[in-house]
Amino acid sequence: MFVNYNPIQHRPAKNVSERNLVGQHDGELSEFKVESLELLESTEKNLLALEGGSDFRANYDSIFRVFHTLKGASGMMGLE
């Protein structure tokens, strides 16, 4: 079984199956996955635009917002 290492806590992080998802319904997790994939697709487009020489600041800000949103949403879902 693969276990993620969390260098900040200096101990193995919990496996996804061991995480506490009390109160989370399958529908909420499915919606979280769908929205996360959509956000990652937009990030991919912004990264490709950066590579192509497009407006750095606008694309960088958009990429930052996506990862900030993912971090907050995963925290609300009880994911570590």
Image (cartoon, grey):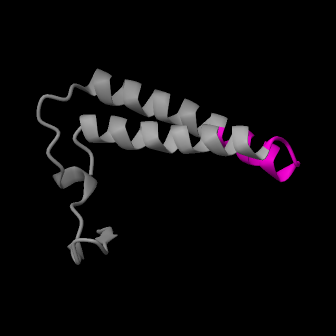
Residue 61 is drawn in which quadrant? top right
Q: Nearer the viewer, residue 5 or 65?
A: 65
Task: Give above or below for 11 relative to 14.
Answer: below
| Residue drawn 63% across the image and 36% down it | 41
Most common secondary structure along the magenta stretch: helix
| Residue drawn 39% across the image and 24% down it | 31
Q: Position of residue 32 (x, y in %)?
A: 39, 30
Q: Classify the position of the N terminus by image quarter.
A: bottom left
Q: Which residues are magenta?
A: 43-55
Left or right of 64? Residue 44 is right
Residue 71 is drawn in which quadrant? top left
| Residue drawn 79% across the image and 48% down it | 50
Left or right of 6? Residue 66 is right
Q: Position of residue 43 (x, y in %)?
A: 64, 41
Q: Nearer the viewer, residue 35 or 47?
A: 47
Magenta highlight on residue 46: yes
Left or right of 73? Residue 41 is right
